[in-house]
Every structure is written in structure tokens, then in C-alpha cells.
Amino acid sequence: MVAEVDDDYVANASEDDDVVVRPRRGGTTTRQSKQEKESAFEVTRTWEALQEAPDGTITGAVDELMEAGKKKRLLKDTTPLQRGIIRHLILILDLSIAMLEKDLRPTRYLLTLRYAQDFIREYFEQNPISQLGIIGMIDGLAVRISTMSGNPNDHITAILNLRKQDPKGHPSLQNAIDMARGALFHAPSHGTREILLIFGALHSSDPTDIHTSIDALVRDRIRAKVIGLAAQVAICRELVSTTNDGDTSGYTIVLNEQHFRELVLDATTPPITQKASTTTNSLLMMGFPSRTVEPSHSSLCACHENNPTREGYLCSRCGSKVCGLPAECPACGLTLILSTHLARSYHHLFPLNNWVEVPWQEAGESTQCFACGKPFPSAPASEKEPKRQDGVGGEDASSSGSGRYRCETCGCHFCIDCDLFAHEVVHNCPGCQSGRVRAPHGVNTEAIMNGNGPNGVDGPMDTS
């Protein structure tokens, strides 16, 4: 006997339509096509996360989302670790047909190019004496997009030129890492050798055994980091694990557009030196040339064939002219930098300690941000009561929301915007740089700022 089926028959269903039977209440079922499922997946109901305020606006909800994003910086680890401040990195971009997918808006390809530009700017901002090169994987081949150099403008121009072409073919991971290995093979031993791969496909079209290329990376001490735009790929996981002494934390999968940007910019921080034997201690000779201007005529620089300029820098060893810094002298090979470049590279080795959030019970010590002068919010009436020993009343620092963040060294209070600016841009505390010392507990920091209280020295501050 044939069992009775209460479901309606769907005729003329194409082979591409996956018919899904879902039980209803009462035993009936419904069908959903593959197109309907994909449409439901692509619709992101972001508006449901916003709640209107009593006045009918969403300003408060937006401010809360922005505040939560800024507070993520408070979770960053600022433990001083040994890192390589002179980096040599190859950025490998997937230019295959898989990058035409629209799960990342507008497409994987266009979003990758935009974030690649942001990465280049931030990379040279955080690592001014480092080098960068770009390689693309397209149609089963590896193409050189830009050569290894320390000029961010050359790399950004090369990325902009990629917008004129469309992705095609399949990626070849082996050809890409072989070309990257050739570019990093002659990098000096005092710097790091790294590969950052942005991979959107789920396969790799390789000419031979890719494991031989991975073993060659290990011999040349080249470390790989992979950002996947789809599901995990076994060979990418093996690439990261093999080149990082079994550590697979360098292989991450993108969740959304914002997460993609965070992963890309996270690669601007130099990797931690895992073994003491990885690099040998040695002295590195550098030159600090002065800027020169030729008022009467232009001259060619040693780094370009047809680019006459009046301004440039003369090598402190051989006198050759280079048009920009940092650079390596094309004539004698001396590394040429400015003293400011070297100073900006040291913040990775000695990061600024995290500031702690000030509870409402201590919020009365300041009324405005020490750096920008922005007024702090006043404490609510329910928070002005001191916290008793039994824990009743008041609130702890983790949920205070006072908008104040204190440097544990100087004791000054700052707003969250100055917290971000100090830790991500200047990498110095304004209070510590101004010579402040930590105020005793209970002393109003506004009085110290105005010269009317203790300043760590015997007697009041001299404001004359």
C-alpha cells in the first residue's frame, strides 16, 4: 500500500530548486525553494537591533553602539612582548572568480580592494621602517601587483588599478607562495618575513605538490597568516600551522564586513617572536639623511629612472639622491630613515598601558577630560551614595558608565575618545608627558590641573 501524503505536489520544479518539506501544526508541511532560502539569508534585519527612545529618535541607540565599539579597545592586551619592528610582508590577494560573490557588500572583490588600501595606510603608519609587496592570484597564475618597497603611494596606486579588471579563473595558492618566497628570500635576517593571504575560494589549483612549497617557507623562516572569506580550507590551516610552530590562531574566517576590516587591520601589529633562536642579535647600520632642495634645476633620483625632482634626501654614505624615506639606498644598500620613523616603531615594544574605568564613587575628582577639556557627565543621584562594606549601594567600575578613564601612572581622567586617540595614534599619555604624577586618593585632580593642590612635589604647584 502507498502511504497517503497530505502535501501538495509541486510541478515543473527545476533541478536547481531544493524542495524542503517543513511540518506545520497539525501535520501539514510547506516547501521552500533554494532561491527563497538564499533571499532570506541575504536579508539582514539590522534595524531590529535598534530601539526608539521615548522621544521617537534612535540617537541614543546609535550612541550606545558606538560606545560599545570604542570599549572593545579596553580588552586589548598591552603586555610588552618581543616583536620585530622591521617587517617584510607580502600581501596576497585572491583575484579569482570566487571574489564575485555578494555575501560581503558590495562584492568580496571590491570590499577587499577597499580594505587593502586601509591596510596599506595603517601598515606604514604603524611600521614606518618596514617593507611591503602585493601579489595577486588570478586564472591559475600568480601576478606581481607591486614590488617590495616602503612607499605606500605606489601600493595604493597599484590597488586602484585593479578596479579596472574583473576577477577570473581559479586561484593557485602554490604559485602565490612561491612568488612570495622569492620576494622575501633576500630580505635581511634582522627583519621579519611574513605573508598575509586574503583567500575567498574553497580550493586551490596547483601545478605540483603544495606541501613542498610550505616546507620551503619553513626553511626560510617565513610566517603565514590567512584571512578566509568563506569556510575553512584544510590546506590554509596547514599552511598557518606549519609556518607558526603549530599555532593556528593566524587563520581566521570573516563573519561580516566590520569583522573583515578588524582582521585586516589587526595584521598591522608585528607578530610576536616565538623563539629566541629565530633571529640573531646584530647591529644594523642606518643612515639619517637631511632633506635637500635644489632651487635652480631638477635632477634624477637613484630610485626612479625618469623622475626629475628638486627635492630629495642625500645618502649619508655615498651621497646618492632618493626622493622619499624610508628607503634603501640603491647605490650602497644603506637603510635610510628619519629619527621620527624609528621612534614611531618602538610603541609596539613598549605599548601604553590600558586605562581603567572610573566608578561613580570616584567620579567627583574630575569634571572634564584632562586632554581635550570635554565636560564629563554628572553622577546620577542614585550613584552619589558611597558603597557600603556589604556591597549595598553604589556600583562597580565594570558597569559604572561614568565616561571617565584613569591612567594608573599619573592619575588623570580622560574621555573615551582621548583614550582611543592616546592608545591608537600617539601611543603616549598626555598626563604623563606633561609631568603629572599620580594624585593621592581623594584629592581633586581639577585642583592639581589648576595648580591649587599637591603635584607630587613638596608644596603647591608653582604657576608663575
Image (tube, grey):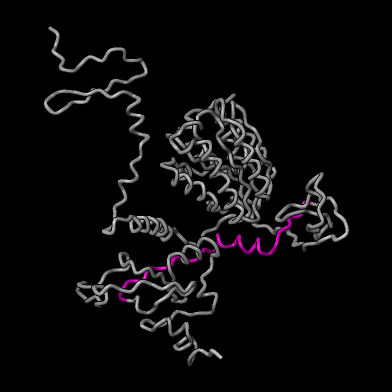
Residue 130 x, y percent position in the rendering? 64, 52
In the depicted structure, whether residue 246 falls above or below residue 269: above
Q: Quadrant of residue 77?
A: bottom left
The quadrant of the image that shows the C terminus is: bottom right
Asked whether residue 267 is in view, the answer is yes
Task: State whether residue 273 appears in this view.
Answer: no
Q: Position of residue 338 (x, y in %)?
A: 70, 62
Front-lying residue, 98 or 127 = 98
Q: Which residue is nearer to you in this view: 382 or 210? A: 382
Range drawn in magenta: 333-361
In the image, is residue 334 part of the stretch drawn in magenta? yes
Q: Is residue 115 above or below residue 371?
A: above
- Quarter of the picture containing the N terminus is top left
The total number of labels drawn is 0
Quadrant position of residue 172: top right
406 or 409, nearer to the observer: 406
Foreground of the two, 35 or 401 = 35
Q: State left or right for residue 25 relative to residue 332.
A: left
Q: Is residue 281 above or below residue 407?
A: above
Q: Residue at x 35, y 45 (%)?
A: 46
Name the spot of residue 85 as percent of width and height, x first. Answer: 60, 56
Q: Residue at x 71, y 56 (%)?
A: 325
Is 186 positioned to the left or the right of 434 in the image? Answer: right
Report x, y in % for residue 260. 46, 44
345 left or right, relative to 307: left
Looking at this view, name the residue that lies furthest to the front.
Answer: 55
Is 249 within the magenta?
A: no
What is the residue that sits farthest to the bottom in this orientation? 459
